[in-house]
Image (tube, rainbow, N blue to C red):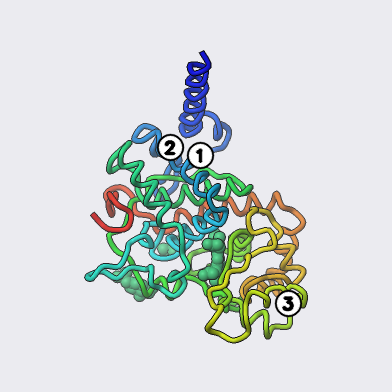
Amino acid sequence: MAASSQVRICLLIWLIGIASSLDLVSSANTAVTPDSNQLSPGFYNLKCPLALPTIKAAVIAAVLKERRMGASLLRLHFHDCFVQGCDASVLLKDTTTFKGEQSALPNVNSLRGYDVIDNIKAQLEKWCPGVVSCADIVATAARDSVVVLGGPAWDVRLGRRDSTTANLSAANSDLPSPFLDLSGLIAAFEKKNFSVDEMVALSGAHTIGQSRCSLFRSRIYSEQNIDPAYARSLQGQCPRTSGVGDSNLSPIDTTPNFFDSTYYRNLMNKKGLFHSDQQLFNGGSTDSKVSQYASNPLLFRIDFANAMVKMGNLGTLTGTQGQIRKVCSSVN
Ligand code: HEM
Ligand SMILES: *[C@@H]1O[C@H](CO)[C@@H](O)[C@H](O)[C@H]1NC(C)=O
Ligand SMILES: *[C@@H]1O[C@H](CO)[C@@H](O)[C@H](O)[C@H]1NC(C)=O
């Protein structure tokens, strides 16, 4: 008796999962306009109805195991999209004859979450072989990560295909450095067709995750526009001299496991971790947007979600372009 009612509850949960993945429940009221680039949220409804529930379950499990993984999966999507588009190029591992993006300066010993994506892909290859692209898995996992950590939800437009190439030099040149000034940040995002306001919204991703000492050392020892107590607390984990301690981790935000808008309040209190973060509130043209997001968390959530949809549309392969990889780390 107990067993059969358990089965019924499981079935119900499963059906809700399917229904929500079919956009019958969660997105009934959101207008879904087709993109010029042909992506659509319902792309897998008939082709692989278990795709979205499988990804969501795997992301929840990964984040329960390690909270930071949510941040890592979000960053993985960003580093995919900013380099020749959201085409899973970042997942391709180096071989003797192929040099991918994973050894690029912003990625090496830094980018994480590859295993989580590989594991999701392996599950989906059992349910629906050759159907779900690695690029779509990354995009969906990024959204699910943000949601699990308390951030906004958005409909992920789907139907991306996977690249057969990667571009190491583009990864080195197009991913913004934490040592950039405001003008450099604006230029890096402008190159991908983002407005300054969208750049400020996307930067709010630094509300979750961790960073290595080598990337903010110069800020905490020699910059003036930093809260002294905040700098001192970071110095405890990040010794002045480079070398030992370079890879020591510190939280990227004061609440690194929650997708909230404290990032912006911290900037206003001179508690940005990276030089680049603090550039957004340093007496320049982006100050007003930062104050707005600090005082209006809901506005941040809406703008972040919209900017993520736009980022997810960067340079996508569709139709018969590229391929659906069997394994995300290598081409077919
Ligand atoms: C505005 C320009 C940006 C710069 C200069 C920048 C730079 C960085 C750096 C240096 C790290 C630490 C890496 C390490 O410790 O190895 C980091 C972490 C992170 N970045 Fe950014 N980033 C930027 C924008 C973004 C955007 C647009 C997103 C996502 C939409 C994002 C998401 C993240 C996340 C979630 C982490 C933490 C990752 C983890 O804990 O594994 N960043 N970023
Ligand atoms: C790789 O990226 C560089 C720098 O953005 C670009 O000049 C080059 O054309 C790209 N290579 C290929 C094969 O797309
Ligand atoms: C930005 O927009 C221009 C004009 O529509 C387009 O040609 C270009 O490919 C876009 N760049 C990116 C990175 O999407």
Work out whether residue 113 or residue 134 is closer to the camera in this orientation and state it: 113
Of discs 2 and 1, which sits in the foreground? Answer: 2
* Label 1 crowd bin: few (<14), some (14–19), many (20+), radius 10 Å: few
Of discs 3 and 1, which sits in the foreground? Answer: 3
CA gap, disc 2 and disc 1:
10 Å
CA gap, disc 3 and disc 1:
48 Å
Q: Which mark is residue 232?
A: 3
Of discs 3 and 2, which sits in the foreground? Answer: 3
- The amino acid sitting under disc 2 is Gly
Mark earlier in primary sequence (3, 1): 1
Q: Which mark is residue 32?
A: 1
* Label 3 crowd bin: few (<14), some (14–19), many (20+), radius 10 Å: some
Residue beneath the point at 48% across and 25% down: 15
- The amino acid sitting under disc 3 is Arg
Residue 207 horizontal/vertical position (percent): 64, 60
Residue linked to disc 2: 42
Residue 43 horizontal/vertical position (percent): 39, 39
Residue 200 appears left or right of 120: right
Residue beneath the point at 45% across and 71% down: 174
Q: Quadrant of the C terminus?
A: bottom left
Work out whether residue 34 or residue 328 is closer to the camera in this orientation and state it: 328
Confirm or deny contact between disc 2 and disc 1 (CB under 8 A): yes
Residue beneath the point at 58% across and 44% down: 153
